[in-house]
């Protein structure tokens, strides 16, 4: 037992954990800044640019402000659940990074049911939203929570079904094997990514992922015009910051899964000296994830929110049949070839 | 390695808690939750035996139990909504029109 | 080590299951049920059935209990009301009878030895899928029929005016 804790592999594992979680937390903080600056750019205003050069210290200032704010608990709120909800929503969001491979070696662990593990963990995230809305003892949060529970339940179906086609082709649930199954190219120049084999699945996945993370145009759970701020209306200070972090962490998780499933994970052109070869896979992975986050922010900046009944109809009558048809056709092709 | 008996006793205790809940509680949602506890206890038994015998069939049955649990929850909760709409109460003793 | 883990998760499961019954409000009961499910899933992992463990969390915690909580919030339920007088004696009869049932099950389990097999088996997705779609394909299709009927039944029951 003691030998294990002083062994080299344990220290390497700890170093990886620190690197991954440190990197992810920093990236989350700067994603908020990126989102605000880009939204501002689209809307032709400067955005936060006063704290540090280009506003680069803004996340630190925000963090300090969240920490120093007064802790307010609404009257007759359910105190236990009110405090527990942000934690319940943040922990699953961060836990899923423990199985995501950021590079051939930069991963904490690799489960042989890694993809399902992530789906299981993220499906627990809905409780944070639902309990937060219920415990606040206020009508707008309650309505936001009810919308969130129905919406996330509905879109989780198409999200899960959309990846089945990819799994049929690659025949594995381990995230690292999923990436290695997409190595190489067709005809020497088209990368062997699943997006070219499963365009419909990719389309369904990306849309359901936007809905799963409760972002525009599907942010019915918080829609500020009707529900003030939805389920986190009554939250402020550090508790709000935890909800906020969880939302961004979920965004990074679904983007990472999309990268691993459809865009070949850390695969990319390899060149240069040895140290560059070591770093390149992680660079490719991070830039692909960043491309997804960029797309998310652009969608938020440009697409209006849809109505609640339209959201439900779209989920059940368009996305779900599409995902099922994709499974049917893929299984036919896989069986015949 | 954990002896099989430990799992069986644990599953029995869980099943018993479910049965007790079903008899003692009067709220229909609590009754449905007790049924879920019982189903989980049974699942645990299936998986324990499957692991003990080196036979996958036990785990397949857990799938079927899961499907039945999902169907039961969906229909049960629909009934709960209908019942609450009719008599503004979820106490199973209150829905006694067919009893004397 | 593995015994400690077993005892830990067993205690968690039993405690959470008792808490489901003790809580006055069904919302707390549902939350406690999630804790119990997660503990049972952890026990599945100890039994080398990691695929089922994950599926258990996805189906129960991710869907069924969310459905319960959705209905509880939709109806905005009051705190649990007590039973009528007619059934009050059940509370006191239940515990000794339950202990008796436990005694019966326990005695059976201890007396009947179970032959253990040395075959190594893992509940990997491949093995389960292989078995599910060859040996058990008929029951599998029948459950799909069952779930379809349940779907229609739920819609019919919950609809306001049919």
Image (cartoon, grey):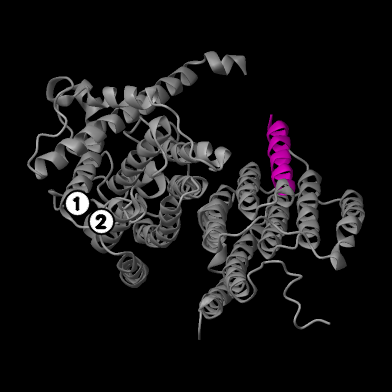
Q: Is residue C13 magenta?
A: yes
Going by the image, does C32 lie left or right of A217?
right
Looking at the rendered image, the quarter that the N terminus of chain A falls into is top right
The chain holding disc 2 is A
Residues marked 1 and 2 touching at CB (< 8 Å): yes
Q: Is residue A68 above or below residue A269?
A: above
Going by the image, does A41 lie left or right of A168?
left
The magenta segment: C1-18
Looking at the rendered image, the quarter that the C terminus of chain A falls into is bottom left
Q: Which mark is residue A217?
A: 2
Q: On the image, numbered disc 1 is attached to which residue? A: A299
Q: Where does the image place residue A28, in percent across and percent down from the top left? A: 30, 33
Circle 2 SS class: loop
Q: Nearer the viewer, residue B20 or A9?
A: B20
Q: Local crowd at mark 1 within 10 Å, few (<14), some, or many (≥20)?
A: some
Instruction: Give whichever of discs 1 and 2 has the lower sequence position.
Output: 2
The answer for how far apart the CA atoms under marks 1 and 2 are is: 8 Å
Q: Where does the image place residue A112, in percent across and percent down from the top left? A: 48, 45
Q: Is residue C11 above or below residue A192?
A: above
Going by the image, does A315 lie left or right of C138?
left
Q: Where does the image place residue A154, in percent across and percent down from the top left? A: 41, 62
**Outermost residue toward the front?**
A75
Q: Can residue C48 be seen here? A: no
Q: Is residue A283 above or below residue A132?
A: above
Q: Nearer the viewer, residue B48 or B89?
A: B89
Q: Which mark is residue A224?
A: none
Q: Total number of numbered labels?
A: 2
């Amino acid at each position: 037992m003691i030998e294990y804790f002083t062994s080299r592999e344990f220290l390497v594992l700890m170093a990886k954990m620190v690197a991954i979680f440190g990197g992810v937390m920093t990236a989350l903080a700067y994603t908020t800044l990126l989102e605000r600056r880009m939204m501002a750019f689209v809307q032709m205003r400067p955005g936060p640019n006063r704290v540090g050069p280009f506003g680069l210290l803004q996340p630190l200032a925000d963090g300090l402000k969240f920490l120093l704010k007064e802790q307010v608990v609404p009257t007759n709120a359910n105190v236990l659940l009110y405090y527990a909800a942000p934690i319940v929503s943040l922990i699953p969001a961060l836990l899923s990074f423990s199985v995501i491979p950021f590079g051939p070696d930069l991963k904490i662990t690799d489960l042989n049911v890694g993809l399902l593990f992530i789906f299981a963990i993220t499906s627990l995230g809905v409780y944070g939203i639902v309990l937060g809305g219920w415990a606040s003892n206020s009508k707008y949060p309650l309505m936001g929570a009810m919308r969130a529970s129905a919406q996330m339940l509905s879109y989780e179906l198409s999200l899960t079904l959309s990846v089945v086609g990819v799994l049929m082709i690659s025949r594995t649930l381990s995230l690292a094997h999923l990436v290695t199954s997409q190595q190489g190219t067709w005809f020497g120049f088209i990368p062997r990514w699943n997006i070219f084999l499963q365009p419909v699945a990719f389309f369904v996945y990306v849309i359901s992922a936007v809905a799963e993370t409760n972002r525009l145009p599907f942010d019915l759970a918080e829609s500020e015009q009707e529900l003030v701020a939805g389920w986190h209306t009554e939250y402020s200070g550090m508790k709000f910051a935890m909800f906020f972090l969880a939302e961004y962490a979920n965004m990074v998780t679904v983007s990472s899964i999309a990268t691993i499933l459809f865009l070949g994970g850390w695969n990319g052109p390899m060149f240069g000296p040895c140290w560059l070869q070591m770093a390149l896979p992680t660079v490719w992975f991070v830039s692909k994830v960043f491309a997804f986050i960029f797309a998310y922010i652009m969608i938020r900046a440009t697409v209006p929110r849809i109505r609640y009944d339209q959201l439900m109809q779209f989920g059940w009558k368009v996305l779900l049949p599409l995902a099922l048809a994709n499974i049917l056709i893929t299984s036919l092709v896989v069986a015949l070839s | 390695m954990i002896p099989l008996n430990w799992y069986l006793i644990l599953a029995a205790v869980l099943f018993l808690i479910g049965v007790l809940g079903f008899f003692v509680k009067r709220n229909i949602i609590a009754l449905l939750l007790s049924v879920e506890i019982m189903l989980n206890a049974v699942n645990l038994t299936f998986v324990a035996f499957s692991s003990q015998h080196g036979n996958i069939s036990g785990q397949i049955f857990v799938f079927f139990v899961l499907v039945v649990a999902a169907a039961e929850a969906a229909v049960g909760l629909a009934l709960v909504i209908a019942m609450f709409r009719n008599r503004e109460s979820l106490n199973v003793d209150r829905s006694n029109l067919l009893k004397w | 080590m593995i015994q400690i883990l077993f005892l830990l998760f067993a205690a968690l499961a039993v405690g959470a299951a008792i808490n489901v019954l003790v809580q006055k409000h069904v919302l707390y009961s549902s939350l406690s049920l999630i804790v119990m499910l997660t503990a049972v899933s952890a026990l599945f992992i100890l039994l080398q059935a990691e695929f089922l463990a994950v599926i258990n969390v996805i189906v129960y915690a991710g869907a069924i209990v969310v459905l319960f909580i959705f209905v509880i919030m939709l109806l905005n339920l009051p705190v649990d009301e007590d039973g009528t007088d007619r059934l009050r004696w059940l509370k006191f009869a239940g515990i000794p009878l339950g202990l008796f049932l436990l005694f019966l099950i326990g005695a059976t389990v201890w007396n009947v030895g179970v032959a253990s097999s040395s075959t190594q088996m893992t509940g990997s997705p491949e093995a389960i899928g292989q078995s599910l779609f060859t040996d058990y394909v008929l029951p599998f299709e029948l459950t799909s029929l069952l779930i379809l009927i349940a779907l229609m039944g739920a819609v019919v029951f919950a609809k306001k005016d049919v």
